[in-house]
Amino acid sequence: MTSSLVELRRTLHRSAERSGNEAATAEIVLEALRALDPDTIATGIGGHGIVAAFEGSVKGRTVLIRSDMDALPLPDDPRLAWASEDPVTAHLCGHDGHMATLMGVAHALRDRRPARGRIVLLFQPAEEIGAGAHAVLHDPAFDPFRPDMVFAQHNLPGYPLGSIVLRKGPFASASRGMIARFEGRSSHAAEPHNGASPIPAVARLAQVLATLPQHATALHETAQVTVVGMDAGGPAFGTNPSSGTCMATLRAHEQVVMDRISEAARSRVEGLARMYDLECSLEWVEEFPATINDPDLTDLVADSANSLSMNTEWREHAFAWSEDFGHFTSAHPGVLFGIGSGNRQPALHAPGYDFPDALIEPGSRLLSEIAHRALERAHANEN
């Protein structure tokens, strides 16, 4: 099984597709799933998502395990024998490996279905832009597969290969992109008093946002605002511009803090617009809720890892990055955990990163163990 999953991972790597465009990826996944005889397969979920359900002989609870599918708009390492065929799109976050790992769970379920209940495997599109999980959860075609518990893993460079990284409560931060647009009046550059340039507001907003967490959070809370872009005017030296934009990413470990700093940012934008006699608008994009791990289910993951003699590491703080699995943990009890991809592995989204094939087999075994244990524990508690 391992060699076929490695080949699948490399095939998926070659066929890397960006968020929302995972059509060929879905076809590869679908062909592999059909050979494993799930009880139900559904396609086109939340875009190009695929669901496969493996049912026990007795009805009961439903456990869902999710893998992401999309790649990044980044170049691959051309030296790889399985390098992406698209020169500007690559699996530099390991979603190819996540899919192969979940397919390993499907292999295991072909041979050992749950005694009671149902295990649902979700291959989810558009994680990188924060849209896929939300689209799946709001797709009526997903309704027959609504879970009682949800689980997902993500590989983590910088941790020993195969180690399991856990945290109860917030595991990955909430984040959202902010686009602030200002509209004024253009004028001749020799007559700036006849116009209303947005440049002072854009420049001032960039400075204000950098200090926003200090003014909008308590000492025990954590938040971050990063200005990621500014756009106003250009090499038209005779013109005082009329429009400008400032873009930033807001992050917080908890949703209540995210809501507070978002409101504070909105207030600053509107205040600067009034100060400089401008119109303004705000757009929120790529919104990721915080991923909150259920404490009891996190213990179940730890127990499962220990039963397989896998080393576990508990984090004191949530990760600063975001994951759209937070949409699932907002709707259902669940856990996102990390699996170490090596201390010397390049960082996620960085040049030279490539998912280690050695993670596929242990990752599959752990996810399978988690799913069976979760069902057994849930049904035992009902009796």
Image (cartoon, rainbow, N blue to C red):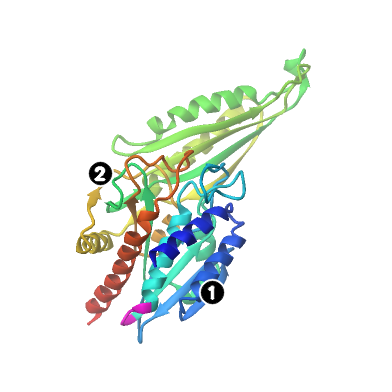
**Chain part drawn in magenta:** 111-116
Looking at marks 1 and 2 on the same chain, the residue that comes earlier in the sequence is marked by: 1
Residue in front for this viewpoint, 173 or 82: 82
What residue is drawn where x is 49% and y is 76%?
35
**Residue 273 in view:** yes
Q: Quadrant of residue 180?
A: top right
* Spot occupied by residue 24 in the image (x, y as percentages of width and height): 61, 61
Position above or below: 112 against 205? below
Helix, strand or loop status at disc 1: strand
Position above or below: 216 against 232? below
* Spot occupied by residue 15 in the image (x, y as percentages of width and height): 58, 55
User: Gap in Å between the C-alphas at discs 1 and 2?
Assistant: 39 Å
> Does 29 lie within the magenta span?
no
Q: Which residue is mark 2?
A: 316
Position above or below: 299 against 118? above
* Spot occupied by residue 199 in the image (x, y as percentages of width and height): 64, 23
Give amino acid for label 1: Ala
* Spot occupied by residue 296 in the image (x, y as percentages of width and height): 24, 62
Helix, strand or loop status at disc 2: loop
Residue in front for this viewpoint, 47 or 201: 47
